[in-house]
Image (cartoon, grey):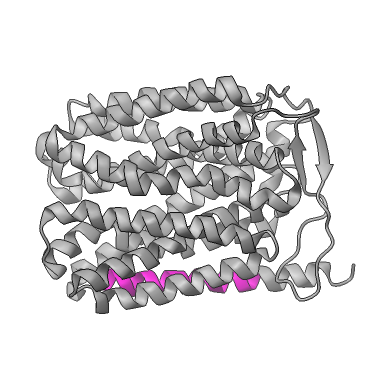
Amino acid sequence: MQAFAVDAAVQHGQLGAMDASTTIDRPSGAVRHVGLTHLALSVGGFAIGTTEFATMSLVPDFARDLGIDAPTAGHVISAYALGVVVGAPTIAVLAAKLSRRTLLIGLMTIFALANALSGLAPSYHWMLLFRFLSGLPHGAYFGIASLVAASLVPREHRTKAVARVLLGLTVATIAGVPLANWLGQGVGWRWAFGLVALLAALTAALVAVFAPRDAPDHRASPLRELGALKRGQVWLTLGIGAIGFGGMFAVYTYLADTLLAVTRVSPSLIPIALMVFGIGMTAGNLIAPRFADRALLPTAAVILLWSAAALALYPLAAGNWWAMLADIGAIGIGGALGTVLQTRLMDVAGDAQALAAALNHSAFNTANALGPWLGGLAIAAGLGWTSTGWVGCGLALGGLAILLVSAMVGRRTTAPA
C-alpha cells in the first residue's frame, strides 16, 4: 500500500479547509474491476439499509409475535443503534492491523449471522441481543468500504465513489424496505431478517472475488487510529451528523403512525410512502456528490437548509396524501448529508482514517436515537404526530449551526498559512 497526500490548498471563498496531513491509502499498481468492486460494496450497503429501515416498519409485527407493546418493541431499534455506536469505533481501532479486504469479509459474515439469529429470536430479550450484535459491524463496514471505494478513483471523484457505496443503502429504502415490509405482512417478519442475512452473505462473497487484495498497513495501530479523537474538526463533523441528521429520523420513525392517524390512508399504502422516501434519498445521493467534490461544506450547508425547510412543511402536508408524498420525498433528499460528511472526515482525520470513517455512522445512529426520542417526547406531550416535523426542523438547523462553527474554526486555523 502506498499513501498519497491530499492537496491542502484551500480555494478562495470556500467554507472550511482540508487538513494538510490527510492521507488515503491507495492500492499499489492498477486495480481491475473498479466498478464491480464498488457494486460489491454497495450490495453490503443494500443489506444494511434494508435491515436498518425495515425494522422500524416491522415494529407492529414482531411486537405482536413477541408479546410486547409498541414502545417496548422500539427498544429493539435502539439496541441496533447502540450496536452501531459501540461497534464502529471499537472495531476500527482493534482491527487497525487487518487488511481492509479481510476486514470487510469478516464484518459481512458477522452481519449475516446476527441477522439470521434475529429472524430466529424466540423472545424479546434474545431479539434485543441479536439486534445489538447486528449493529456492531454496521459503522465499521461503511467506513472501511468508503475508504476502499475512494482509494480506487482520483481524488476529485472521492465523493462520487463514496456515494456509490451508500447508493446501496438508499436503493434499499426504495426496494429492500418495501420488500421486507411486504414480507412481514405476508409471510412473517422473520423472513425479512432472513433476506438480509442472504444479502450479507452475498456481499462477503462478492468482496472476496472483486475487492483488491491489499496488504495490512504496517504503520497502522490502535494508538494511531485513536489520534482522530484529538482533532477538533473530526468532532465538529461528527456533531453535524449526530444533530443535523436527527431530524430525518424523528419523522421517519413515526411516519407510519402519522399516515394512519393524520393522513388516514390504508396500511397497504405505507410501503409506497417508504418507497418515495427512498427515491428522494437516492436522488440526493446522485446529485449532491457532483457539487460536493468541488465545494464540500457549502454543499452540506445547502442540504441542511433544504432538510429544515422540508421538515418544517411536514405538519402542513400531513393532511393530504399527495402533499405528504411530495414532502416525504423532499425529506429523503436530505439523506445525501451522509455521503458529504463521509468525505469531509477523510479531509480532517489525518492518518486516522479508519476510525474517523467508522465514527461517521456512529454519529448517524446517535441521530437515529436522538431524533425518535425527541419526537416521542413531543408526541407524548400532546403536540400530535406531526410535531415530529418541527422537532426535525430544529435538529437540522442545529446541525447547520455546528457546520458554521466548523467552517469558522477551519478558516482561523488556516489563515496564517
* Quarter of the rendering occupied by the N terminus: top right
Query: Does 139 sit above or below residue 307?
Result: above
Residue 404 belongs to magenta span: yes
* Quarter of the rendering occupied by the C terminus: bottom right
Res. 105 in view: yes
Viewed as shown, does residue 265 lie left or right of 155?
A: left
Residue 412 belongs to magenta span: no
Q: Residue 141's spot in the image, x, y percent?
A: 53, 35
Q: Nearer the viewer, residue 48 or 278?
A: 278
Quadrant of the rendered image containing residue 388:
bottom left
Viewed as shown, does residue 396 lie left or right of 352?
A: left
Q: Residue at x 26, y 73 (%)?
A: 323
Q: Residue 58's spot in the image, x, y percent?
A: 21, 43
Which is the main secondary structure of the residues drawn in magenta? helix
Viewed as shown, does residue 349 lie left or right of 376?
A: right
Query: What stretch of residues is rendered in magenta?
Result: 387-405
Viewed as shown, does residue 353 lie left or right of 45?
A: right
Q: Residue at x 10, y 58 (%)?
A: 266
Query: Does 11 sit above or below residue 293?
Result: below
Res. 386 in view: no
Q: Residue at x 10, y 40 (%)?
A: 64
Q: Residue at x 71, y 54 (%)?
A: 348
Q: Nearer the viewer, residue 357 or 256?
A: 256
Query: Does 365 sit above or below residue 400?
Result: above
Q: Residue 228's spot in the image, x, y percent?
A: 68, 47
